[in-house]
Image (spheres, rainbow, N blue to C red):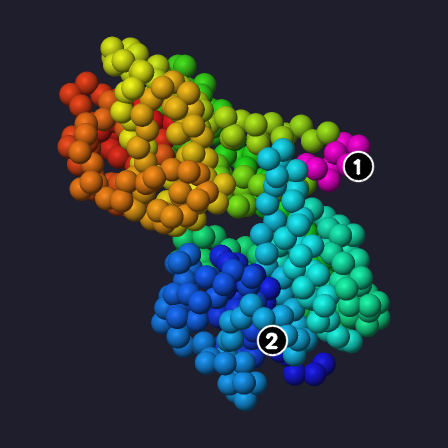
Amino acid sequence: MKETKIAIIGLGYVGLPLAVEFAKKYQVVGFDINKTRINELRDNLDVTLETASEELELVNVASIDNLNSSKTGLWITDDLNEIAAANFYIITVPTPVDKNNRPDLNPLYKASETVGNVLKKDDVVVYESTVFPGATEDECIPVLEKYSGLTFNKDFFVGYSPERINPGDKLHTVTKILKITSGSTPEIGKYVDEIYKSIIVAGTHLAPSIKVAEAAKVIENSQRDINIAFVNELSKIFRLMNIDTNEVLEAAGTKWNFLPFKPGLVGGHCIGVDPYYLAQKAMELGYNPEIILAGRRLNDSMGPFVSQETVKMMIKKGIPIKDANVLVLGITFKEDCPDIRNSRAIDIVRELETYGVIVDVFDPWATISAVKHEYGIELISSVGDINKKYDAVIAAVSHQEFITLNLKDLVADNHVIFDVKATFPKEKSHSRL
């Protein structure tokens, strides 16, 4: 193989950390269609907080010419011509679902078209986006062939290496997570594996086929989704029994092989989405997946459930519901992370609004403009801006900043506190999942 030059398509939560690590050893061009994102990254600013400014500054080069004249580095661009010199393309675009929870492959098609327009003989294209088994070969490769005019496994080759990024996790970063790799031929599989192995200190696992690698990825998050659905169902059952679910799980967790899952809202780009990819493919093949979709239904019910239980508690305490003031703490999909994609905290807000409740949302991690654009909500910018007393507070996300909040300053004399993730000591809340 000739000297490897890498182009990474999509510079989000997955693509950017990968580009930075590869740029320490290779010439890397990072491509994205978001001009604002391009300008921020050129100024060494990553609003996702997955990559520190110091890391970006270390690898960023001033121009494509500077990159071509050096052995390593990263050039960030939205110019298609500037990825044409690469011979190893990595596609890391998102794979969402539509409003009916059907897989939306449009970002993948567009990225494949982009690469297809510059693809050359002997180039390799690696997909990292989460998909159903068979998507790379059945959906993506035909697009590459159409726009390149080249023949798969004769003129160009393909690999699949699913991303395993955990947003907000500073311990399990990209190089410290074992990487699954695969290739369209045994030789390409070994080549793809060697490229990733050169930066992944945790090591790699070369799968025997692309379909096996795709399937392995999609069941990782489906398994977690189902396990969380189980404890969410337990929380509903134990609530009827007036038993604290967290105390039950703590006791059960004393057995060495008990799995430490906790109840809560299940959002984000992975766990709340990926099971639908597997389910959709299964239904296309004539099999109706029962457990996978049951888990999805139960987890998607938790936001409305929290709202309904909060309203019930308010009624029992004699708090009028119409025009009541409720504060929701947290809108990101998980703690200590700015990622608002597929956040299920919004379900709490929407359900409360159906009761005529006035809902405010505070989240120190979320970007105000992003939340406004995505959900149409005006975030409270700081606790100091709050000038009212709330009839109820729902702690939806367990940000570290919330632990030190003085809740007494935020609530009316007669109030309800629902602590979804057991952020506070038990005595400080009226209810936990």
Lateral position of residue 189 relative to residue 96, left or right: right
Classify 225 as above or below 184. above
Spatial CA distance of label 1 from label 2 is: 41 Å
* Residue shown at 41% from the left, 48% from the top: 370
Q: Residues within 10 Å of mark 2 (few under 14, many from 20)?
A: some
Residue 81 - label = none
The residue drawn where x is 59% and y is 56% is: 93
Mark 1 touches mark 2? (CB < 8 Å): no
Residue extent of the magenta highlight: 279-287
* Residue 8 location, quadrant: bottom right
Q: Amino acid at mark 1?
A: Leu
Residue 283 on the magenta segment: yes
The N terminus: image quadrant: bottom right
Residue in view at x 73 percent, y 51 percent: 135
Circle 2 SS class: helix
Amino acid on which disc 2 is placed:
Glu
Q: Does residue 275 belong to the magenta stretch?
A: no
User: Where in the figure is residue 39, as x and y percent of width and height?
Assistant: 44, 67
State the mark number for residue 82: 2
Residue found at the far bottom of this picture: 69
Where does label 1 land, which residue? 285
Image depth: mark 1 or mark 2 in front: 2
